[in-house]
Each structure stands twice: as structure tokens, then as C-alpha cells.
């Protein structure tokens, strides 16, 4: 089992910054978590990929966040981060962290990010 807990969301003005965190804990036979990712879902829209990062640090970003968001992780703390700069109102969404372990997807409960214009 993998338990994911996001934090760091909030209300920010356009152009501002926020850093999200995702703390992961494992039980049973899952000892290491490989690829982790951030997703988001805006009201009335489908959940979409924001960025992913492998255990080794290889990153991948959606085009709409390239140059503004930075994903990182601290494997010693089993924690992943998303630094969001130059936020836009269209970045408003619930942000989720996720991973897959032993063929099963795991999701956090989500953290709300609201960007005011």
C-alpha cells in the first residue's frame, strides 16, 4: 500500500507562486516508489497530467506549465514537490499527486489551488 498526502495549496494572486508537497508512505512489500506525478482537475474538466518525475530525477512536463513549474523529489524523505511560478487564473484546480506501485495506481486526496486575477 502507498499513502499519499498533498499539502501547500491555497489562494494566490496571478503572477504569484506556490509550492505543493506530496508525502508518501508505504506499507507491506512496497519499499521504493519509482515514478511520481502531479495531476490537476479544474471544475467541469477532466483530470490532466501536470508533471512527472522518476526516482532518478528524470522529469516530464505538460506544455502548459513548461518554464513555470518545477517538479522535484527528495527520496530520503519520500516527498515530491511542485514549485509553481507565474501562476495564472487558468491554473486554478485541485492538484493531486499519484504513483503506481506493483501495478496499482495510488492517489492523494488533492489540494486546492486558486489563482485570482
Image (cartoon, rainbow, N blue to C red):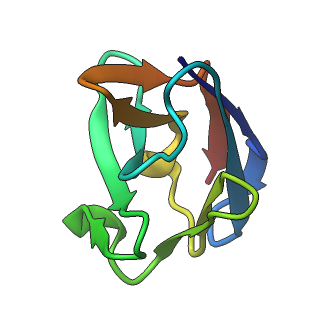
Task: Look at the picture and state if 52 lies above or below 71.
Answer: above
* Residue at figure coordinates x 66%, y 48% from the top left: 116
Q: Is residue 71 left or right of residue 110?
A: left
Q: Is residue 37 left or right of residue 1?
A: left
Task: Look at the picture and state if 65 lies above or below 29.
Answer: below
92 or 106: nearer the viewer: 106
Task: Look at the picture and state if 21 lies above or below 39.
Answer: below
The x, y position of residue 115, in whole percent, is 63, 48
55 or 41: nearer the viewer: 55
* Residue at figure coordinates x 40%, y 48% from the top left: 37
Which residue is situated farthest in the bottom direction here? 67
The x, y position of residue 19, in whole percent, is 71, 61
Quadrant, the C terminus: bottom right
* Residue at figure coordinates x 51%, y 60% from the top left: 88
Which residue is situated farthest in the front direction here? 29
**Residue 102 visible, this angle:** yes
Dividing the picture into quadrants, the one containing residue 43 is: top left
The x, y position of residue 5, in whole percent, is 70, 30
The x, y position of residue 1, in whole percent, is 53, 17
Q: Is residue 73 left or right of residue 12?
A: left
Amino acid at each position: 500500500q502507498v499513502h499519499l498526502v498533498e499539502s501547500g495549496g491555497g489562494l494566490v494572486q496571478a503572477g504569484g507562486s506556490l509550492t505543493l508537497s506530496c508525502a508518501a508512505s508505504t506499507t507491506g512489500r512496497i519499499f521504493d516508489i519509482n515514478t511520481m506525478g502531479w495531476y490537476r482537475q479544474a471544475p467541469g474538466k477532466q483530470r490532466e497530467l501536470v508533471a512527472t518525475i522518476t526516482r532518478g530525477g528524470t522529469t516530464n512536463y505538460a506544455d502548459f506549465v513548461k518554464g513555470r513549474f518545477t517538479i522535484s523529489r527528495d527520496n530520503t524523505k519520500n516527498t515530491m514537490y511542485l514549485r509553481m511560478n507565474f501562476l495564472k487564473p487558468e491554473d486554478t484546480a485541485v492538484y493531486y499527486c499519484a504513483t503506481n506501485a506493483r501495478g496499482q495506481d495510488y492517489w492523494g486526496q488533492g489540494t486546492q489551488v486558486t489563482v485570482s486575477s
